[in-house]
């Protein structure tokens, strides 16, 4: 699996990590406990089995031209009833255009993940991967009281087989870790 992910500005990253910590401190599921070096707040634009030839450079050029993008967070939500707890990202016209352009580059890619396809994609920042919908109200009180602000400033690709990331931008802060 290969992804295309947008990386948060330092202030947005810190705000999401603070929400992870508040959830964990309240005894709720949270990504705060994921210590893998690639774990960081991000927005997934696409996930496919592998990139077609030439796609990585085209994605880098695309992301370099589009970033930074402002971020406005919406409400906390549990996707699919009992799966990830997320902060919804309000889809600006620029973000929707970038998402569509990424999928244009990946049109020939094998194994597209249906959650990320145009028309099905729900832009979000994950707070917990396995969450009980019954805890939603408590999570909103604990994590959702302060909505951090910021931008998406870089892009990366996660490689599921090797559990590594590669940068998809040549400008901005380091997007790899």
Image: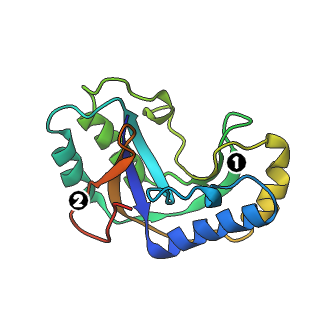
Nearest to the observer: residue 148 or residue 96:
148
Q: How is the image coloured?
A: rainbow
Residue 137: image x %, image y %?
84, 53
Residue 120: image x %, image y %?
51, 32
Q: Report the disc number at residue 44.
A: none
- Position of the N terminus by quadrant: top left
Nearest to the observer: residue 10 or residue 118:
10
The answer, for residue 88, to whether it is visible in the render is: yes
Secondary structure state at the residue bearing disc 2: helix
The answer for how far apart the CA atoms under marks 1 and 2 are is 31 Å
Q: In this rendering, is residue 169 above or below 102? A: below
The residue tagged 2 is 65
Nearest to the observer: residue 90 or residue 127:
127
The answer, for residue 144, to whether it is visible in the render is: no
The residue tagged 1 is 77
- Residue at 52 percent across and 47 percent down: it is 123
- Residue at 33 percent across and 54 percent down: it is 156
- Residue at 41 percent across and 47 percent down: it is 96
- Residue at 59 percent across and 67 percent down: it is 17
Residue 169: image x %, image y %?
25, 59
Q: In this rendering, is residue 140 above or below 21? A: above
- Position of the C terminus by quadrant: bottom left
């Amino acid at each position: 699996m290969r992804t295309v992910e947008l990386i948060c500005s330092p202030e947005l990253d810190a705000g999401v990590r603070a929400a992870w910590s508040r959830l964990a401190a309240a005894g709720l599921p949270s990504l705060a406990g994921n210590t893998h070096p690639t774990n960081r707040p991000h927005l997934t634009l696409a996930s496919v089995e592998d990139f077609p030839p030439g796609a990585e450079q085209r994605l880098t050029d695309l992301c370099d031209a589009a970033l930074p993008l402002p971020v406005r967070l919406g409400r906390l939500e549990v996707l699919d009833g009992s799966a990830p707890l997320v902060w919804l990202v309000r889809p600006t016209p620029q973000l929707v255009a970038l998402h569509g352009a990424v999928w244009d580059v990946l049109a020939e890619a094998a194994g597209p993940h249906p959650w990320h396809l145009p028309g099905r994609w729900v832009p979000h920042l994950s707070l917990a991967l396995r969450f009980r919908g019954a805890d939603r109200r408590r999570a909103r009180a604990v994590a959702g009281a302060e909505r951090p602000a910021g931008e998406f400033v870089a892009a990366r690709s996660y490689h599921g087989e090797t559990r590594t990331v590669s940068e998809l931008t040549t400008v901005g802060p380091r997007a790899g870790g």
